[in-house]
RNA sequence: GCCGAAGUGGCGGAACAGGCAGACGCGCACGACUCAAAAUCGUGUUCCUUCGGGAUUGUGGGUUCAAUUCCCACCUUCGGCACCA
């Protein structure tokens, strides 16, 4: 097969892209979820058909809408609607969750991704935050001094877009939304330390965002460059590469296809840290995130090789290749249509063809140009290059399959061993010279396709006979040998290329942190002096529907004087990408009102680094990569310590609507946490969110399912508050032993599951234990020390999950010392968890045929003889001796007949 | 094409380190209470069955006394990257 195969765009794929686009237009929840966040959506939706969709779902939504919120729990005194706000107020008054430095205790910095103040807390926020809160509470009970802060990622486009529509100033809208969301966040009963709150749009905060920009600028990590950048025509701003999504190349926020524009923009030199960002040593992050980041950085190893023009031996054309072992097979060279040398090398005869091709390439969008199924096109430049390894004269072509943005914008084409080059050579009838002979085929006829695989180098001068394989880089003996030789000959050297690009941070918008730079004709660009920070956003701005940044249109704001010479100068009117604000917010929590620097070092030394970070995976190649870069840059500036800001990362999944689709207002499948809290209480909602799915997977919401959690909560309440001690009988000793065993087994599991973020099994363990406690109560356990211990431990285990009901029972019903949230996490009594008598299944030929009951510490021999003595086993043995008997002590006996 | 993840009852899910598959919950069925309903409580609930059993963790192989778990191949779904030289 010759020409690159056509890859028809399937219906499925089109649908997927459309869905992606649609999703991109949706509101953001935590930080800035993007279509990437749909990951879990479709997985879950696809996993189990969509059977339960419409009727029931509509019924439920209708019911929720119609019903005025009212307590569902009737006839008993459990009343979360009263009890929860009461405790929230008391905890706040008592500053129960204030975290201050305490050198006598180990610290634990639990961070959850800060929300964007969209106006309403979404169920997704609850899903991310309440289990994180429960875990932070657990850590606190374990004796850690826990910092669990909250803030708002308050700059950003939605507020500005809304302002263009209705004229309400983003500042006003944002701070109103924050006020509203604070109330909602409080209703979660979370242990946020509100005194550490930060708001990124607050001048007190963005002063330091600007300050960091200048730091990076002074380190040479911020630079201004004219380049072809991605532009979202709807949001009227440039975007970072990370914010352009998928093969359709749409805006991460609004789903509009981006276009290219040549603009001067500010960049951060993130690529300087590419190699370091590939190293995840010392951090416990999900493999998935590490893989995404690794792929995003896209390191490839190879060599750069110096060709020169036939017409000018002093010229140098550098190419990058991952296959230096195929250098002898280079039969032509291809330049990108944007290559700067083109004008110089094109011959007069070819000029018109080349110019026409360049024009055509420039007119095409990236999508058209990079379409996979497009047939290769190109034009001969008339020029020839000399291959330095064998001094062959090879023609130079231009083709749009070579990108200026990767490598050097010029390639050596080896059609015999590269599919793209092969297709191109076939089309334009260029020579194909095999230089790797497959080990299997001794004499192969004319190549039908590019050969990529193990083999022996041929037609390769001094390297004939050298073995090559498919390994990349120096691990491949052929490549290693050629690289060494290139370096010795001075015609090339080992080299690494990355897909990763520098971070474009300029945004042509108003509602962001100003880029604190000033331009004057004499001294060029200079940073605003530190004592003049922050550069404040002007408040009196006009909203024009043109979409132009009001900063640009403001009559006076941009006028200033040059900090170097005092000449008239203008301010940069672009603002910073909001991901810049969120790259360091975890540092501002340490001392949100500190004014001598971005943070107080004393606080830093105590709290940093972040011990656990929780949030959505949609930020894998955006926020989570930016913040790592930022930390490393600050480390090199001597501002931070250590190589990584966040030691452990865990991602929650996504809560879908009941119709198994992503929740959205337009679909009408949104589950509002406020409604749920009014109806069931925060404790129930918290518990259900922890219970109803694996936290890292997420699942569709199930409004029936929550009933189980409602029942559980009620049963908890009744067990602890119902004074009836039903049994007159004295409990059997084994009842109490069993109760105690169950309690400690549960404690062991719950402790382990909290450590591992396995929240669903925490709840099921607690449900199980409650069922056992009901039975024990029936059996007369009430009033015994074992019963009291069970009660105490149960509440302590419940406290992180359902902080209000646990406090109410502990403090008010049981009159224990306030607060349960200041109690120590109980210790597992290992001895109590052990069973005395165990039931062991006996397998005969792999099938369970009998069960025997033996003492837990019975020896293998005892177990063996008990098993062989059992009737069922004797039946299968039919009097014969077993071939083999395996005893897994305490677990199982396996008899082979 | 490359890289990664997942697949267990009607549903969400459980199974610590290879050892009883289906914990816990939803739903459903039956029963108790009730004039009745709701709520609550109790019992049952993977499938097939000739009631002896048999099958069963996406499919097919393999290792093992024993596999949801380890290995190989494949299928499906999801995600990321992609004319990346």
Image (cartoon, coloured by chain):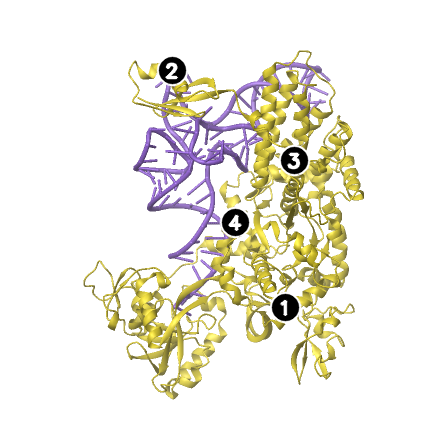
Disc 3 and disc 1 on one polypeptide chain: yes
Q: Chain of mark 1?
A: A
The residue depicted at 49 percent of the width and 75 percent of the height is A362
Name the residue beneath numbered marker 2.
A872
First in sequence, mark 1 or 4: give its number.
1
Q: CB atoms at circles 3 and 2 under 8 Å apart?
A: no
Q: Tell me what hue chain A is rendered in.
A: yellow
- Marks 1, 4: nearer the viewer: 4
First in sequence, mark 4 or 3: give its number.
4
Q: Which mark is residue A236?
A: 1
Q: Can you give x and y, in whole percent of width and height, for residue A793 in the image?
A: 66, 29
Q: Which mark is residue A314?
A: none
Disc 4 and disc 2 on one polypeptide chain: yes
Q: CB atoms at circles 1 and 4 under 8 Å apart?
A: no
Q: Can you give x and y, in whole percent of width and height, for residue A381 in the image?
A: 38, 81
Q: How much space separates mark 1 and mark 2, taking CA atoms?
A: 78 Å
Q: How much space separates mark 4 and mark 3, taking CA atoms?
A: 27 Å
First in sequence, mark 1 or 2: give its number.
1
Q: How much space separates mark 3 and mark 1, taking CA atoms?
A: 53 Å
Disc 3 and disc 2 on one polypeptide chain: yes
Residue at the top extreme of this rendering = A729
First in sequence, mark 4 or 2: give its number.
4
Name the residue beneath numbered marker 4.
A286
Q: How much space separates mark 1 and mark 4, taking CA atoms?
A: 35 Å
Left or right of A713, for residue A429: left
Q: Chain of mark 2?
A: A
């Amino acid at each position: 097969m010759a020409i690159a195969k056509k890859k028809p765009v399937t219906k499925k794929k089109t649908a997927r892209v459309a869905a992606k686009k649609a999703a991109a237009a949706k509101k953001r929840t935590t930080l800035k979820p993007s279509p990437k966040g749909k990951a879990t959506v479709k997985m879950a939706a696809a996993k189990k058909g969509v059977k339960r969709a419409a009727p029931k779902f509509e019924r439920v939504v209708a019911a929720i809408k119609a019903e005025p919120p009212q307590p569902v729990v009737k006839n008993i005194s459990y009343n979360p609607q009263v009890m929860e706000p009461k405790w929230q107020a008391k905890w706040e008054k008592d500053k129960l969750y204030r975290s201050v430095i305490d050198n006598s205790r180990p610290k634990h910095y639990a961070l959850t991704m800060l929300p964007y103040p969209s106006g309403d807390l979404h169920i997704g926020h609850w899903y991310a935050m309440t289990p994180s809160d429960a875990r932070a509470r657990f850590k606190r009970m374990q004796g850690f001094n826990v910092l669990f802060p909250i803030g708002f990622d308050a700059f950003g486009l939605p507020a500005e877009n809304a302002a263009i529509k209705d004229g309400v100033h983003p500042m006003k809208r944002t701070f109103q939304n924050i006020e509203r969301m604070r109330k909602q966040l409080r209703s979660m009963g979370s242990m946020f330390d509100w005194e550490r709150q930060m708001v990124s749009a607050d001048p007190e905060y963005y002063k330091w965002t600007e300050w960091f920009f200048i730091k990076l600028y002074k380190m040479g990590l911020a630079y201004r460059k004219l380049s072809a950048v991605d532009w979202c025509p709807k949001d009227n701003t440039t975007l970072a590469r990370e914010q352009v999504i998928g093969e359709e190349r749409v805006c991460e926020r609004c789903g509009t296809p981006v276009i290219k524009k040549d603009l001067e923009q500010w960049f951060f030199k993130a690529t300087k840290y590419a190699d370091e960002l590939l190293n995840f040593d010392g951090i416990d992050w999900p493999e998935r995130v590490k893989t995404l980041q690794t792929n995003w950085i896209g390191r490839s190893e190879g060599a750069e090789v110096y060709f020169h023009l036939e017409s000018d031996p002093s010229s140098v054309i550098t190419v990058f290749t991952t296959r230096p072992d195929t250098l002898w097979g280079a039969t032509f060279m291809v330049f990108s249509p944007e290559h700067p040398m083109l004008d110089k090398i094109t011959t007069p005869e070819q000029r018109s063809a080349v110019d026409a091709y360049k024009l055509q390439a420039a007119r095409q969008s990236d999508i058209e140009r990079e379409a996979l199924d497009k047939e290769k096109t190109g034009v001969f430049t008339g020029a020839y290059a000399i291959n330095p390894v064998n001094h062959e004269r090879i023609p130079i072509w231009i083709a749009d399959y070579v990108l200026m943005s990767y490598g050097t914008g010029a390639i050596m084409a080896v059609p015999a061993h590269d599919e793209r080059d092969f297709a191109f050579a076939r089309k334009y009838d260029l020579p194909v010279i095999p230089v790797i002979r497959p080990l299997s085929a001794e004499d192969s006829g004319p190549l039908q396709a590019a050969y990529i695989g193990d083999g022996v180098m041929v037609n390769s001068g001094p390297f004939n006979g050298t073995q090559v394989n498919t390994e990349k880089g120096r691990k491949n003996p052929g490549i290693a040998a050629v690289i060494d030789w290139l370096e010795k000959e001075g015609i090339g050297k080992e080299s690494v290329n990355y897909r990763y690009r520098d971070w474009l941070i300029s945004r042509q918008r108003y509602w962001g942190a100003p880029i604190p730079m000033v331009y004057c004709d004499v001294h060029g660009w200079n940073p605003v002096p530190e004592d003049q920070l922050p550069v404040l956003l002007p408040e009196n701005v006009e909203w024009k529907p043109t979409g132009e940044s009001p900063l640009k249109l403001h009559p006076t704001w941009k006028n200033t004087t040059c900090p170097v010479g005092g000449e008239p100068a203008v301010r940069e009117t672009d603002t910073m990408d909001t991901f810049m604000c969120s790259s360091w917010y975890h540092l501002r929590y340490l001392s949100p009102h500190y004014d001598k620097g971005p943070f107080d070092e004393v606080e830093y030394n105590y709290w940093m680094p972040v011990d656990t970070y929780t949030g959505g995976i949609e930020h894998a190649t955006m926020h989570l990569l930016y913040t790592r870069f930022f930390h490393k840059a600050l480390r090199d500036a001597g501002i931070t310590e250590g190589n990584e800001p966040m030691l452990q990362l865990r991602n929650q999944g996504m809560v879908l609507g009941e119709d198994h689709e992503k929740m959205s207002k337009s679909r009408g499948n949104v589950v509002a946490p406020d409604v749920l809290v009014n109806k069931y209480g925060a404790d129930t909602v918290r518990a259900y969110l922890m219970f109803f799915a694996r936290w890292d997977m997420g699942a569709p919401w199930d409004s029936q399912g929550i009933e189980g959690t409602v029942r559980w909560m009620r049963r908890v309440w009744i067990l602890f508050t119902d004074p009836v001690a039903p049994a007159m009988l004295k409990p059997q000793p084994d009842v109490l032993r069993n109760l105690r065993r169950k309690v400690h087994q549960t404690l062991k599991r719950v402790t382990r599951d909290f450590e591992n973020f396995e929240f669903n099994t925490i709840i099921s363990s607690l449900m199980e234990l409650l069922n056992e406690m009901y039975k024990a109560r029936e059996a007369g356990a009430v009033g015994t020390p074992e019963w009291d211990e069970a009660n105490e431990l149960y509440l302590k285990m419940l406290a992180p999950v359902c902080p209000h009901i646990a406090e109410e029972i502990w403090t008010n019903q049981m009159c224990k010392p306030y607060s349960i949230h200041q109690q120590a996490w109980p210790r597992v009594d290992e001895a109590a968890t052990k069973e005395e008598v165990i039931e062991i299944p006996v397998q005969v030929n792999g099938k369970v045929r009998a069960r025997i009951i033996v003492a837990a510490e019975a020896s293998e021999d005892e177990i063996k003889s008990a098993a062989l003595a059992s009737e069922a086993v004797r039946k299968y043995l039919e009097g014969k001796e077993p071939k083999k008997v395996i005893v897994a002590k305490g677990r199982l006996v396996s008899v082979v007949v």
